[in-house]
Image (spheres, rainbow, N blue to C red):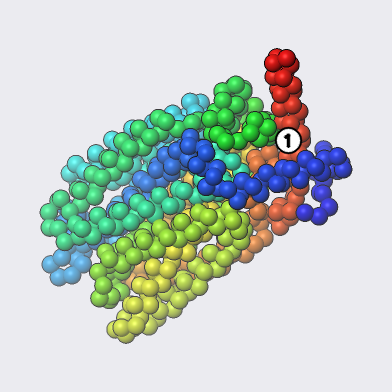
Amino acid sequence: MGRPLQCEGHSQLQRSDFSTKKLLIKMSERRKDTVLYTLVHNPRLAWSGLALALTFFTFGFDGGVISGLLAMPPFAQKYGDGTAQLAPGVPALSSQDQSLLVSVPNSGCLLGLPLAAYLGDRIGRKRTLLVGSVINIAAAILQVVAPNMAAMVIGRWFTNASIFIFITMASTLMAETSPPAIRGIITGLSIVLIDASAILATGVNYAFSKGTTARAYRVPLSIQIIFGFVILVSTLFVSDSPSFFLTKSKDVKALSALRSLRRGYSETEILAEFEDLKAQKAIREKTEQVPFKALFQGTDLRRTLLALSIPNMQQLSGIAFATNYVVVFLSTIGSTVSPFVLSMVVALLAFTGAIVGLFLVDKVGRRVLALTSFSALFVVNMIVGIMGFLPVTNPIVPKVIAAFCCMFGFFFAVGFGPLTYVVAAEMPTARLRNRSSSFTFLTLACFATVVTYVLPYIVNKDAAGLGPKTYLIFAGWMAGCIAVIYVYLPETQGRSPAELDEMFGAGIPARQFKHYVCQVSVDAHILAEKEAAVEQAVTIERKE
């Protein structure tokens, strides 16, 4: 790694520390090479990761279902204002109806995120997820029985409130319970489940796309009730965060929780990680007494902006369009293939991309994955946008647009998929992580509300009618994102929370994070080895 670097408040690494440093690095490399081994020998960790990822299933299914319902004549006939038609005699939702149904529910974050921030610091991450499950079930029932547009919007509003509780608490809990070496994979499970649920949603939509009764849209909506109950039950068996217990000065519970999540690890490794968690200087502060403005003070300002970066960058990447309006859009480009079938292809490719991204995020790192996937999205958006200037009567044009829309789903899932939740969860310090996650997803929701409200007026023929040309806006946005990522996003792959605290505190430039040697990691392992040696000596003495 070259010459050891030096942090403020730490002396340069001594020669006597090098053996420990090499051991620590060797341990880290071993874990990276045995991810499957780690999960197989840690059933509680594997279960917690999967159960928490299930909460994201509601997010993907909600977006996938509403995308199909917008293009279903029975749904438009029941809830539309009657001013728009998909074809002569075929009712459709107007741009105003689409904006109302998609964008207004995003403001459910105004309930979900403050509730997550408040409860997460008081009753814990796990119990807050249980509260979200109850809200989710009630909201899903309301959507199924909704007699009019107002009731449908209210039902979706509360569904979104529960979803924002889920994504805030689940992503935080995933990051806090995962070993640093596989934190990206565990947290990245979220996008795999989101895209898996999107496949299910598009499949269900396609199965009922030719229906002419209320059953065509009520069956897809009713499936959400099942998800709510599954999440409620599975969360009961999830371990709460050791970091949460430490913020409450409950060290015994924290160590017990950590041990339950680290089966197969030696006592030395467990104690090293525990000391590493305790080394975060402010972790014992009363998090409920930390003012909101602390997010924007000192070194935490940089960490807050980084946590905000990738989640908010995704909104104008084209995903808001691809998620909520893809079926309606594909039905207008003149393709001979059913838009419901094309949306299934988009979902399948996105799912494939999510699996690829799941492993790449810890294999190549955050910076490399972001720069390469964002560059691919820039190219895709440019090509679709340019196609918008060509006549759709040319049979090649709709085929190219449809093909690159499908490719968009793949590259988005590879990059933005895991990075959105990994970056938002691992950038903040422990005492601010819950507040930072809530604030990140609040800004994301506000941005999404604006984007999803405006898009129909830009794209649809009954408004500005830009159609595929809209993708040029997305391309310009991605060009700016690439520049920001290159300059400001640090590489946090495999780093512990205490290491990140040390590097951010020392003001290390983003491009130096990858090769920086932290004193805190060496100190934690030295202390853990001493404690383990003492325990071993006591055990031997008792036997004698």
Q: Residue at x 64, y 27 (%)?
A: 284
The x and y percentages for residue 203 are: 27, 57
In the visual, does 422 lie left or right of 62? right
Residue lying at the far bottom in this picture: please name it: 394
Q: Nearer the viewer, residue 158 or 454?
A: 158
Q: Residue at x 42, y 39 (%)?
A: 51
Q: Quadrant of the N terminus?
A: bottom right
In the picture of the structure, the residue carrying the numbered disc 1 is 525
In the visual, does 527 lie left or right of 446? right
Q: Is residue 475 above or below residue 8?
A: below
What secondary structure is found at the residue carrying circle 1?
Answer: helix
* Quarter assignment of residue 143: top left
Q: Nearer the viewer, residue 532 or 522?
A: 532
Q: Residue at x 41, y 72 (%)?
A: 404
Q: Is residue 151 above or below residue 194?
A: above
Residue lying at the far front in this picture: please name it: 544
In the visual, does 26 lie left or right of 236? right
The x and y percentages for residue 291 are: 60, 32
Q: Quadrant of the C terminus?
A: top right
Q: Residue at x 52, y 69 (%)?
A: 376
